[in-house]
Image (spheres, rainbow, N blue to C red):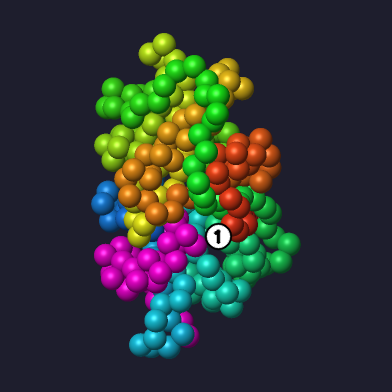
Amino acid sequence: MTWHLTHDVEEFCREAGEHLAADPVGNTALLTVSETVRRHGPDAYGDGGGLPVRFGWWRDRGSGPVTAAFAQTPPHPPLFGPVTSHQARELARVLRADGAVASGVRGPDGGAQAFADEWAGPGRWSEAVRSRLFRLGGLCPPEQPPPGRARRATEADVAQATAWMTGFAADTGASTDTDYTANMARRIADGGLHLWEVDGRPVSMAAHSPVLAGQSRIAPVYTPPALRGHGYAGAVTAAASRGALDAGAEQVLLFADVADPAANRLYERLGYRPLAPYVELDFAE
């Protein structure tokens, strides 16, 4: 029973791909991260400061099936899908022995705490974000949509989308020093970024990820503060959700911050149903 580590995303996809595809909902983030690194390289999620990306998979026995997986793309913390507490603790030990650096961890409730206790020690970590994974049932667009219309973003929208992504990062506690230009250009090139515009002026955005193993995830959703309260976020999220379905997604997912009840209610009105709790934990200095 052990974790196998690699810096090679292709090896990870060969070894863990069947496991990820067997539970595309639980492994939604791992599917997206591994495919993004595979297509766009190890710096796709930012400058890791010389630290390598790491991927890994767990087998209960040497030739047995993979039953858990993780990824880390510095400067971001380790990320995993469904894991047992034992697997999470063992992952912390293996990563530390391999020279990994971690300032936190992201994953399902329970496993993340077990990892944090092993890595940082009990009481030496704090909860940064508690979120809930939602899955779309039947899409229910707003009965009375706001003025305007949805459209797919084009190359001409990269600068606007980048500025809004920086605003989204500020709202969610992510780095505002990151240059999100390449990230948003990729989303636009993939056809997943949708804008709501009024009188030809974009007022809100939402994106869906490329369809992998039958799933697509909505993120980010952003409306500038001065334009909030008009229903734009709901309308553009419905458009992005429809875009994911039209692209072939069998399951459309999203994460919502539990501390934002208005957003949670909005997603439920659109037809999303809560599935499981997730957390982002920060380690004490």
Query: Which residue carries the number 1 mark?
Result: 107
Q: Looking at the image, which residue is at 52% across and 38% down?
A: 140
The residue sitting at 38% across, 13% down in the picture is 200
Picture residue at 32% right of the left edge, 45% below the top? 247
Q: Where is 171 relative to 117, above or below? A: above
Q: Residues within 10 Å of mark 1 (few under 14, many from 20)?
A: many
Give the side of residue 26 with respect to residue 152, left or right: right
Q: Determine whether 143 is above or below 65 in the image.
A: above
At 59% from the left and 57% from the top, the residue drawn is 275
Identified by mark 1, the residue type is Gly
- Left or right of 243, for residue 70: right
Side (left or right) of 222 relative to 265: left
Tell me the element at label 1: strand
Residue 259 visible somewhere in the drawing: yes
- Looking at the rendering, the stretch of residues picked out in magenta corresponds to 1-30
Residue 138 falls inside the magenta stretch = no
Q: Nearer the viewer, residue 85 or 209?
A: 209
Quarter of the figure with the C terminus: bottom right
Q: Position of residue 213 (x, y in %)?
A: 35, 60
Q: Residue furthest top?
A: 199
